[in-house]
Image (cartoon, helix red, strand yellow):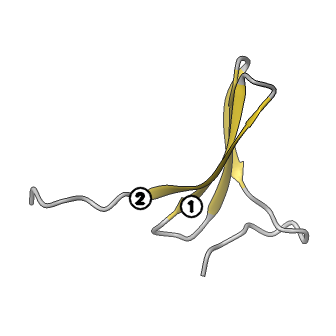
Amino acid sequence: MFGKKEKRFSVKEMESYSGSGTIRIIDDTKTGVNYIMTEGVGGSSITPLLDSNGKVMIEK
């Protein structure tokens, strides 16, 4: 019941841009779906990462 909980999300990559923001690629370890997350002065957003065919990228 109180055992160690496995993290659901892991950060695969992180880059800074314009000195005031970051871009992260996040992996959902349960579903395998990859997300791109941006954070900066104007706020933040997260969306599924798509491949060149417009399909959601999934880790296998």
> Is residue 55 visible to us here?
yes
Residue occupied by mark 2: 8
Q: Is residue 10 left or right of residue 16?
A: left
* Label 2: which secondary element: loop
* Label 1: which secondary element: strand
Name the amino acid type tagged 2. Answer: Arg
Q: Quadrant of residue 49?
A: bottom right
Name the amino acid type tagged 1. Answer: Asp
Residue occupied by mark 1: 27
Identify whether 19 is placed above or below 45. above
Measured in 3D between alpha carbons, the distance from the residue under mark 2 to the one under mark 1, in whole angstroms, is 8 Å
Give the percent coordinates (x, y) of residue 25. 65, 53
Give the percent coordinates (x, y) of residue 10. 49, 57
Count of labels shown?
2
Q: Quadrant of residue 45?
A: top right
Q: Residue at x 52, y 61 (%)?
A: 28
Earlier residue among tags 2 and 1: 2
Q: Residue at x 90, y 71 (%)?
A: 53
Give the percent coordinates (x, y) of residue 37. 66, 43
